[in-house]
């Protein structure tokens, strides 16, 4: 049984999220919560140990932060709170993809971070929300700390289509395919804001159609076409069919530029709240329509 609160002491716990004790950075506040019987002994000890861990101390003492978004409004969670949650050993779901890490830090928020995470992904997600009806997680905070970029967005509960697919009926699969096809049409119907291929803020092109080190930047659509056709000619192996494969996949400069996701795989489509949510927009690119269409049929 917990001891009663000390007599004569009244504490104000407004703004304290009891479901996320990692956001509490003061041992005294944790002690007050325990004494007021707001939290149990196990939660109290776990949170205190988290504060005393070397990683947590490093965050509170030395982390410098540059906020990129939002520029003026106050975000629902502060950068230091995000860093503190990530430093805490409290249980949370996580995913590691190469040097990029993805952590669910609360019931509401997920953070994607790493030295190669690009803040442009957050800009892309906002752009898609404004120009389509495609369900995309809302980005709440983007900041840089110690050489790593952090993107804090809504956590979307649910299962990705890659894991759901074996258990789906034929009609359910057809419905998903039809919905994704609609998303592709919406993306391609966006009027390009530039005649220069590449990310929406321009720069190198990355993704399954380009080398791991990127390609470009291209100054015009014709440059992209020339680069692709040159690379294709060098990669095609003679098949005895008079280069039919190469001719089918060659690009033309008169093909329009369209907005593409760049990595629209089943693992990046999440089924939640009767909707298909699209995540992982880091490889978005404004590219030739023929490029996306040609490779999508392989």
Image (cartoon, rainbow, N blue to C red):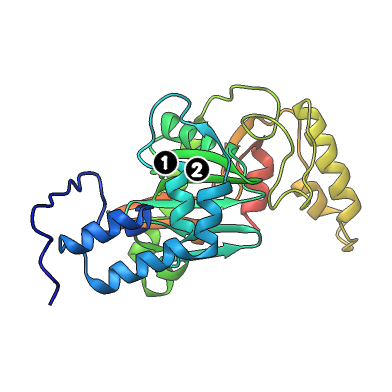
User: Dividing the image into 4 quarters, which one contains the N terminus?
Assistant: bottom left
Residue 254 marker: none
Q: Residue at image x 77%, y 25%?
A: 220
Residue 10 rendering spot, x and y as whole percentages: 12, 49
Q: Considering only vertical position in the picture, is 164 above or below 150?
A: below
Q: Left of 180 or right of it: where is 2?
A: left
Residue at far bottom of view: 1
- Disc 1 is placed on an element classified as loop
Front in this rendered view, residue 6 or 166:
6
Element marked by disc 2: helix
**Image position, residue 75 (x, y; %):** 39, 35
Direction from residue 226 to residue 68 in the image, left or right: left
How far separated are the C-alphas under marks 1 and 2? 35 Å
Residue designated by label 2: 184
Residues packed near mark 1 inside 10 Å, few (<14), some (14 to 19) or many (20 plus): some
Q: Is residue 130 above or below residue 267?
A: above
Most foreground residue, 296 or 82? 82
What residue sits 43% from the left and 40% below the top? 139
Residue 56, image x, y percentages: 50, 58
Q: Name the residue under label 1.
A: 78
Few, some or many C-alpha atoms within 10 Å of disc 2 (few <14, some 14-19, many ≥20)? some
Q: With 169 as the anchor, is 84 left or right in this view?
A: right
Q: In this view, does 76 lie above or below 113?
A: above
| Residue appearing at x 66%, y 45% in the figure | 147
The residue lying at 37 percent from left, 58 percent from top is: 22
Quarter of the image containing the C terminus?
A: bottom right
Q: Which one is in front in this view, the residue at disc 1 or the one at disc 2?
A: 1
Asked which quadrant contains residue 68, the reply is top right
Given residues 241 and 6, the one toward you in this image is 6
Q: Quadrant of residue 194?
A: top right
Counting residues from the N terminus, which is met first, the one under dot 1 or under dot 2? 1
């Amino acid at each position: 049984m917990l001891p009663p609160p000390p007599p004569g002491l009244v504490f104000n716990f407004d703004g304290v999220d009891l479901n996320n004790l990692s956001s509490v950075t003061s041992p005294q506040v944790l002690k007050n919560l325990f004494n007021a019987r707001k939290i149990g002994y196990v939660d109290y000890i776990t949170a205190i140990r988290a504060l005393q861990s070397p990683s947590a101390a490093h965050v509170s003492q030395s982390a410098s932060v540059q906020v990129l978004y939002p520029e003026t409004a106050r975000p629902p969670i502060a950068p230091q709170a995000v860093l503190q949650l990530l430093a805490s050993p409290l249980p949370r779901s996580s995913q590691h993809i190469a040097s990029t890490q993805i952590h669910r830090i609360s019931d509401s928020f997920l953070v994607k971070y790493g030295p190669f995470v690009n803040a442009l992904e957050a800009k892309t997600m906002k752009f898609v929300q404004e120009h389509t009806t495609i369900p995309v997680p809302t980005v709440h905070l983007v900041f840089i700390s110690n050489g790593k970029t952090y993107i804090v967005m809504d956590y979307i509960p649910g299962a990705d289509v890659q894991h759901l697919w074996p258990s789906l009926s034929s009609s359910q699969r057809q419905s998903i395919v039809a919905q994704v096809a609609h998303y592709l049409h919406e993306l391609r119907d966006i009027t390009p804001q530039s005649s220069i291929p590449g990310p929406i803020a321009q720069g190198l092109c990355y993704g399954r159609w380009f080398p791991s080190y990127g390609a470009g930047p291209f100054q015009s659509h014709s440059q992209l076409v020339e680069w692709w056709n040159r690379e294709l000619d060098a990669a095609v192996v003679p098949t005895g069919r008079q280069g039919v494969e190469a001719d089918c996949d060659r690009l033309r400069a008169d093909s329009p530029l369209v907005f593409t996701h760049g990595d629209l795989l089943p693992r990046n489509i999440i089924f939640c709240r009767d909707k298909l949510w699209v995540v992982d927009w880091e490889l978005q690119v404004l590219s030739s329509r023929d490029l996306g269409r040609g490779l999508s049929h392989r």
